[in-house]
Image: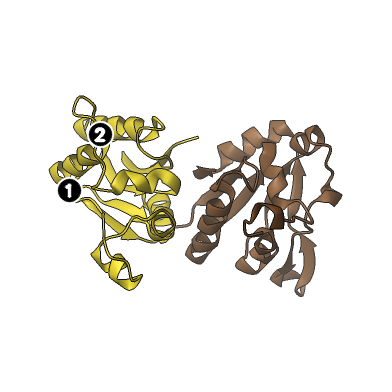
């Protein structure tokens, strides 16, 4: 099967609606197809990868630990819109440290998160062949 | 052109399914190919045959079924999303120990891999929903 550049755009808060959870399910299943996959978190979507999520009060499963496994699924390019973070008073230190082991560099642990400007979001979308927005 | 259509919202609450239907119909009538129609999130609710709208309103579910029959459309309902929302065919119903099933004709239940495959095999993946 051919390889295409997939971009998953995550724009909604992790709770309140099911989109974030069901987006993550597509990403994990899709990983088996060995495509060129990138994730983008923007708008309230940046809250999906915020640290220290606690969901006991809303009796909903906290699925945020799953994001830490993305590196094991060879998903190593996770873009975060810098302006979305700033608008919400967040910095990269408020995010779950997402990493992967680089097999081309003696399995060194590297950051998956790439902060980008909003102008670069356009380029990222233009460069992708299959864009799934959740 | 070859299209895969993804529908993320349920019927009547949201225009997504109507727009997707009209797009799909127009694409087919213009000679394009629809590789697959994939129902996800609340979109799976477009596939229950128990839907009974008032008689002077469109029936979104039977409209999809008729389009599928006419054009031999592959309409796939995500199994995980369907299980959460109570959409089941006879096999799914039995497997989960339920006493009823409700999948409308022309739809089939399968996995998310079918969506990814649609993205890979088609020239365009068009997503309907918010």
Residue B88, percent from left and from top: 31, 59
Q: Residue furthest bottom?
A: A106
Within-10-Å neighbours for mark 2: few <14, some 14–19, many 20+: few
Residue bearing the label numbered 1? B72
Residue A8, percent from left and from top: 57, 47
**Taking B93 as reference, is A84 above or below it?**
above
Residue B86 relative to residue A130: left or right: left
Q: Which residue is drawn at 75% across and 59% down?
A: A98
Secondary structure beneath dot 1 equals loop
Q: How is the image coloured?
A: by chain
Q: Which residue is drawn at 77% across and 44% down?
A: A115
Within-10-Å neighbours for mark 1: few <14, some 14–19, many 20+: few
Q: Which residue lies furthest to the left in this view?
A: B70
Residue bearing the label numbered 2? B53
Q: How far apart are the two marked residues, 1 and 2, measured between alpha carbons?
A: 25 Å
Q: Earlier in the sequence, mark 1 or mark 2?
A: 2
Q: Which residue is drawn at 68% across and 49% down?
A: A48
Residue A40 relative to residue A131: left or right: right
Q: Which residue is drawn at 78% across and 63% down?
A: A110
Secondary structure beneath dot 2 equals loop
Residue B65 relative to residue A117: left or right: left
Is residue A42 visible to the viewer in this orientation of the structure?
Answer: no
The chain to which mark 1 is attached is: B
Pick the quarter of the image with the N terminus of chain A.
Answer: bottom left
Mark on residue B89?
none
Q: Colour of chain B?
A: yellow
Closer to the camera, A7 or A102?
A7
Q: Chain A is drawn in which colour?
A: brown
Closer to the camera, B120 or B130?
B130
């Amino acid at each position: 099967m051919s390889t295409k550049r997939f971009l998953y755009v995550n724009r909604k808060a992790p709770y309140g609606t099911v989109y974030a959870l069901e987006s993550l399910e597509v990403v994990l299943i899709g990983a088996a197809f060995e495509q060129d996959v990138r994730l983008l978190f923007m708008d309230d979507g940046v809250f999906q990868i915020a640290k220290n999520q606690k969901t006991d009060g809303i009796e909903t499963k906290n699925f945020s630990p799953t994001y830490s496994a993305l590196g094991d699924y060879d998903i190593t390019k996770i873009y975060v819109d810098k302006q979305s973070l700033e608008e919400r008073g967040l910095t990269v230190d408020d995010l779950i440290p997402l990493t992967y082991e680089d097999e081309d560099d003696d399995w060194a642990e590297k950051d998956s998160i790439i902060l980008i400007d909003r102008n670069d979001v356009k380029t990222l979308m233009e460069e992708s062949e299959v864009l799934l927005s959740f | 052109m070859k299209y895969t259509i993804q529908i993320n919202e349920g019927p009547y609450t949201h225009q997504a399914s109507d727009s997707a239907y009209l797009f799909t119909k127009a694409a087919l009538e213009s000679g394009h190919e629809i590789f697959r129609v994939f129902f996800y999130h609340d979109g799976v609710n477009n596939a229950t045959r128990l839907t009974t709208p008032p008689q002077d309103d469109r029936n979104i579910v039977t409209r999809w079924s008729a389009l599928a029959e006419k054009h031999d459309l592959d309409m796939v309902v995500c199994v995980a999303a369907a299980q959460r929302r109570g959409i089941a065919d006879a096999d799914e119903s039995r497997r989960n120990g339920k006493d009823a099933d409700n999948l409308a004709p022309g739809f089939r239940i399968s996995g998310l891999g079918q969506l990814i495959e649609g993205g890979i095999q088609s020239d365009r993946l068009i997503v309907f929903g918010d």
